[in-house]
Amino acid sequence: MYIVIVGAGRVGINLASFLISDGHDVTIIESDTKLCDNAVHELDALVICGSGTGIKTLKEANVADADVFAAVTGNDETNLLSCILVKDYNITKVIARVSDPNHEEAFKQAGINFVVSPELTTASYLEKLIIRPKILDLIVLGKGDAELLDITVTNSKVFNKKISEFSPNKDFIISAIHEDGNIIIPVGDETLKEDCRISILVKSHAVKQVENMFIS
């Protein structure tokens, strides 16, 4: 895919790095000359030093050929305007970073459906790790109504029981077993061993139930 990214700050650089590692073609637009120089040295990508809200700069980046356009500067107004300017190019996916959650509705009213707040997402993630100290890791899915949890099975009541006795359930499903550095997708006959690590897809309202079931 060809992706155009506006913003070469921390978020933009990391995003571009991941995409390039995956084999995608990336162009970065950045107005700050120091950030441009940093991007040139950090990434194997075309770096255009210019404004993401300038038509000439957008054309120079060949946005008409882009599969994805992501505006991820730290300035909500810049992100909003640049996304509005590329709407006429019929890009498959236009993504905007929003720093102030109060601005999210303005982005959606402008027709930008993919709106991401790294700051809010990080805060929510940390909050869940704090209030759920027995969870090893988690990913919030959808609109926050489901989570993918990594836990260590320590409740002796479930040791040596088959996964099929618990999963699938209307509120959760055991989606993976981590064993010797490998991930096993369970089919039901596998048993839960003491201190084994499992991944569970669970509805948010049932997280406490899952903790009580598998963690002592």
Image (spheres, grey):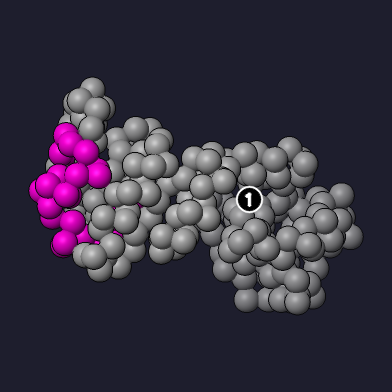
- Residue at image location 57% in from the left, 46% down from the top: 102
Q: Nearer the viewer, residue 185 or 146?
A: 146
Residue name at image x 68 percent, y 63 percent? 145
Give the position of the N terminus as an image quadrant.
bottom left
Could you tell me residue 84's position as x and y percent?
32, 56
Does residue 73 appear in this view? yes
Tell whether position 197 is magenta.
Answer: no
**Is the residue marked by circle 1 packed among few (<14), some (14-19), or many (20+) residues within 10 Å?**
some
Residue 59 is covered by the magenta coloring: yes
Q: Residue furthest top?
A: 34
Q: Which residue is drawn at 73% across and 60% down?
A: 204
Q: Where is residue 179 in the image (x, y as percent from the top left)?
A: 59, 55
Looking at the rendering, which quadrant does residue 213 occupy? bottom right
Which residues are drawn in magenta? 47-70
Q: Tell me which amino acid carries mark 1.
A: Leu
Residue in the picture at 38% in, 33% down: 10
Q: Mark 1 points at which residue?
A: 138
* Residue 91 drawn at (x, y percent): 26, 65
Q: In the rendered view, tell whether residue 89 sits above or below residue 211.
A: below
Residue 162 falls left or right of residue 33: right
Q: Is residue 210 left or right of residue 10?
A: right
Q: In this view, does 37 lie above or below 142?
A: above
